[in-house]
Image: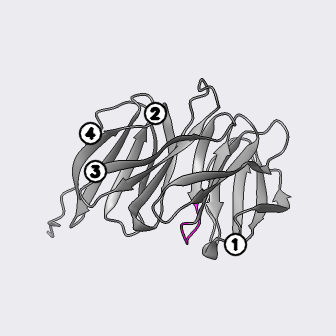
Amino acid sequence: MFLSPYRPSRKVLTGTGPAEVSFNLDGTLLAVTEKTSNTIVVFSIDAGKLIGPFISASAGQEPFGFAFGPHNFLLVTEAFNGAPNGSSVSSYQADAGGGLRLITASLSTTQTAACWLAITGNGRFAYAANAGSASISSYAVAPDGSLALLNAIAGSTPAGSSPQDLALSAGSQYLYNLASGTISEFQIAADGSLTPIGSITGLPASTVGLQAR
């Protein structure tokens, strides 16, 4: 009888309300946002094992969706709707050990319920899906990871819909958003602006995930 030397390991989160879990670009870090405890948890990965957790306070309330960009920049949406200027996005520098250094704190989308986020492959632009506003906000990402709001409503989804997941095509030429059973398609220009190019309708309203190639 063959016995595998592999032994699965388990890590227990100390906060509450996990929203998203994802790796960085080279698979050396794993992050989890915890929207109820307002924390971001990062594990470093060594030979397939999780080291940590390393817990950082979120710059804003209700950290939700996020994405890693080049140079281990971590951009996180903050879905809290009680902020004076709407939901927001923060950026951090993640180090190899799992620590986070705040770069830009809670830059408002001026929209409501910013949830999911995507970063272009070159790391220059980021997009946040605003579930409460049927809109997508665009950000410019500087070489140092700092953020600037380009357009609070760079793209719109069908009236009354609730934008959920975001996905970029290979090469980051196109952005796709899933909202209440409709996939909205946008072309990304060199300046990061979005042009709507079509939509796919009729998906079950319960559809929540999206993946592009």
* Disc 1 from disc 3: Cα separation: 32 Å
Q: Which residue is mark 3?
A: 99
Q: Nearer the viewer, residue 34 or 137?
A: 137
Q: Which residue is mark 1?
A: 173
The part of the image, by quadrant, that contains residue 94 is bottom left
Q: Are marks 1 and 2 in contact (CB under 8 Å)?
A: no
- The three-letter amino acid code for the residue at tag 4 is Val
- In the figure, 175 relative to 10: above or below? below
- In the figure, 61 relative to 148: above or below? above
Q: Secondary structure at mark 2?
A: loop
Give left or right: position of 172 versus 147: right
Dot placed on the residue nearer the N-terminal end, 3 or 4 = 4
Dot placed on the residue nearer the N-terminal end, 1 or 3 = 3
Q: Are marks 3 and 4 in contact (CB under 8 Å)?
A: no
- The three-letter amino acid code for the residue at tag 1 is Gln
- The three-letter amino acid code for the residue at tag 3 is Gly
Numbered disc in front, either 1 or 3: 3
Mark drawn on residue 12:
4
Q: Looking at the picture, how far across and down is residue 132, in whole percent?
A: 70, 34
- In the figure, 175 relative to 137: above or below? below
* Disc 1 from disc 4: Cα separation: 38 Å
- In the figure, 164 relative to 70: above or below? above
182 inside magenta stretch: no
Near mark 4 (Cα within 10 A), the count class, few <14, some 14-19 or many ≥20, is few
Picture residue at 68% right of the left edge, 37% below the top: 110
- The three-letter amino acid code for the residue at tag 2 is Lys
Q: Looking at the picture, how far across and down is residue 176, in whole percent?
A: 71, 59
Q: Which residues are magenta?
A: 119-123
Q: Looking at the picture, how far across and down is residue 183, in whole percent?
A: 76, 55
Numbered disc in front, either 4 or 2: 2
Mark drawn on residue 35:
2
121 inside magenta stretch: yes
